[in-house]
Amino acid sequence: MMKKVYIFNEERGQKLLNSIYTLNVIKYLKKKLYIYIMETYQNSIRDKNSPEAGTCYNTNYNNFYEGLNYQIKDTFFFSFIIQFLLVSLMYYHVGSGKYWKVLFLASLAGLIAAIIEHSSIAFICQKSQRSHHYKVVTFFIEEFFWIFNEYSIPYLNLIKMETFSQINSNKTVKYLIFALFIPFSLIRLYNGYDRMMMGYLQTEKSTSTHGLAFGVIAVADIICTICIFHSVTFSGVDDPLNNVDLFSFIKKSSYTILIMVDIVSIILSVLYIISTFFPSNTALSSSITLFHCLKSEFLLILTTDALILKYEVNNNSIICLSNSSFASSIDLTRKSRSNCYSIEIRTSVIDNNIKSINDTSSQYNRFSNFSGKDNISQLKRYSYLHSKDNTSQIKSYSTLSIVDSITNLNKNINEKEEETHYSNFNKYSNEKEGATQ
């Protein structure tokens, strides 16, 4: 039987090698393409354990208690704890009025929101929950507290604006600030809903929504700042007591805080929006963290500023009372050292005004015996005692009141000194009346 013999020449062998090489290249390309597709697919599927999610990556807590303790060391969490403690301490000892109440409630809302968020992270990031992916409803609930906490800054600036302005044309600005609250709330609630559905914090829409929300706050802050500048600079708000040091301190303090808040809000908004176009830029993300940490302490900064303002007012103000019926009996003499006014009694004319003085004193006692934190707010904002050399009439029952509608700073300012003035005055009056009889 004849066997078939295959003769391989050089041309046929070269074709075979080429075909084998081609097959290897195809296999290699197919492998690379498969790896690329899988990596792209894995990157497109983000969950709570992904590093981009910023939730459970590199945590692996054994239990909820351990996770909560580790979460406390997070700057965003601990800052709200210490902020609430300090604001509460200052509010309890020296705070009163609408401004202080808003500071206290806003710090409380921030603490509650931080506790809800980090407690949720501590729970879903346990080892036992690592493979469980579900909706986190608490991420949506916490947004209501974040809304109140963050938008309290424009509202506090609105209170400042109403305080510094002497005119009643603030309704337009007030309605505008309240109107901006609506889009801010909707943006924050949408962010919370997206987080709830995805089950983690750093969603694809979270960065852009944060940028828009901070942009709305920046607009509201800038509106209040411009109105305050206009009111103080162009509306004739001046210091009638010529207490330049105190009044300049008030303006400098308020201006500095307002400008800082505006700048930080604008920078945060811009950084968040830009980072959506450059998600891989780590410099942008680190810058956002820096300014976000600063923004989380705004309430503590405003509270400290109000406390310093109270200290300055206590050291530079004195309550002065007078009445046109006995203006001729009292000289208001300028104290060069303390920048206040003192009362001098002229005995040459007091004999003829005993009855009028006693009546005025009783009226003053009824006027000055306010009780409670909020009663002092009934006094007119910026009601000063005006003293002019060519005027014989002095406004009655006027009081030096520096931004009392913000903090009710002069609730107990120099009450002892005031009582001393009038006790000595009444004592002298009674002695003169007895001598006359």
Image: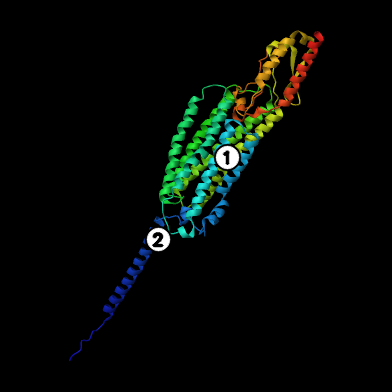
The crowding category of the residue bearing disc 2, from other C-alpha atoms within 10 Å (few below 14, some 14 to 19, many at least 20), is few
Query: Which residue is at 50% across, 34% downward?
Result: 220
The residue that disc 2 covers is 39
Q: Callout 2, which amino acid?
A: Glu
Q: Is residue 308 left or right of residue 278?
A: right
Residue farthest to the left, as pictured: 1
Q: Is residue 16 above or below residue 376?
A: below
Residue 351 is situated, as x and y percent measured from the top left of the image, at 77, 9
Single out the mark in the foreground, 1 or 2: 1
Q: Work out whether mark 1 precedes mark 2 in sequence or the reverse, and give the earlier one.
A: 2
Q: Are marks 1 and 2 in contact (CB under 8 Å)?
A: no
| 13 and 208: which is toward the camera | 208
| 34 and 150: which is toward the camera | 150
Residue farthest to the right, as pictured: 435
Q: Is residue 142 above or below residue 422?
A: below
Q: Is residue 65 left or right of residue 247?
A: left
The residue that disc 1 covers is 298
Which image quadrant is residue 355 in? top right
Query: Which residue is at 33% across, 69% downward?
Result: 27
| 244 and 114: which is toward the camera | 114
Query: Which residue is at 56% across, 55% downward?
Result: 70
Which image quadrant is residue 236 in? top right
Q: Is residue 303 above or below residue 135?
A: above
Residue 262 is situated, as x and y percent measured from the top left of the image, at 54, 37
Name the image quarter holding the C terminus: top right
Q: Is residue 415 above or below residue 108?
A: above
